[in-house]
Amino acid sequence: MSKKILVLTGSPRQLGNSALLADAFIQGAKAAGHTAKVFETAFHPILPCKACDKCWTAGKPCVFNDGLDQLAPLLEEADVLVFCTPLYWFTMSAQLKSAVDKLYAYMKPGALRKLHIKECVLLAAAEGSEPDGDYDGLKATYKSIADYLKWTDRGRVLAAGTWDAGDIIKTGKLKEAQELGTSI
């Protein structure tokens, strides 16, 4: 069965290691017959949630005009959500985190529309080392999101030792991401 996949990227480097991970995953997903769209949170700025609790009062998830206006329709049609981020201070980038925080609007009892997402994936690249615990904060955050929203974790690709753009090419993680995309 064909799935609608939305890949949220959080890197301000358009051709960086995270972007290459996202592209590899998408190639695999499309080869498996799924549709995939990318939303670059770094290039469609989303304001942090202001806890005003005015979600949906303007007929859309957030009363403020920001990148969520473009992201919301993509979220609402997705079956699978992929978080793709560089590792920043042991978790996802602020750009991606702002998008995640805005999911709050869809969890409210009075939400005008609900999400249909049932599955999620984590893709991440970082200079640090995965066995040394650098990814622990990101993995815990991702697991908490998936558990809270009752989404099935379909897999993770964590690419350590990837600081300079293109470093990921030497790691074998692009093949792993493509295979994960194919398996969705």
Image (cartoon, rainbow, N blue to C red):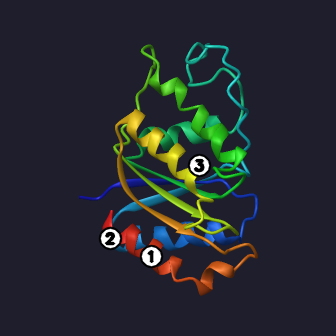
Mark 1, Cα crowd under 10 Å, few <14 / some 14-19 / many 20+, is some
Q: Secondary structure at mark 1?
A: helix
Which amino acid, mark 1? Glu
Q: Position of residue 117 (x, y in %)?
A: 38, 42
- In the image, residue 114 sits, relative to residue 166, either above or below, namely above
Q: Which disc is residue 32 wearing?
A: 2
Label whose residue precedes the other's in the sequence (2 or 3): 2
Q: CA distance from mark 2 to mark 3?
A: 31 Å
Residue sitting nearer the eye, 1 or 180:
180
Left of 109 or right of it: where is 127?
A: right
Mark 3, Cα crowd under 10 Å, few <14 / some 14-19 / many 20+, is some
Q: Quadrant of residue 161?
A: bottom right
Q: CA distance from mark 3 to mark 1?
A: 22 Å
Q: Secondary structure at mark 2?
A: loop
- In the image, residue 61 sits, relative to residue 24, either above or below, namely above
Q: Quadrant of residue 29?
A: bottom left
Name the mark nearer the viewer: 2 or 1: 1
Name the mark nearer the viewer: 3 or 1: 3
Q: Secondary structure at mark 3?
A: helix
Seen from this angle, which residue lies furthest bottom?
Answer: 170
Label whose residue precedes the other's in the sequence (3 or 1): 3
Which amino acid, mark 3? Gly
Which amino acid, mark 2? Ala
Label whose residue precedes the other's in the sequence (2 or 1): 2
Residue for point 53% across, 26% down: 104
Q: Which disc is residue 123 wearing?
A: none
Name the mark nearer the viewer: 2 or 3: 3
Q: CA distance from mark 2 to mark 1?
A: 15 Å
Which residue was labeled with disc 1? Answer: 176
Which residue was labeled with disc 3? Answer: 137
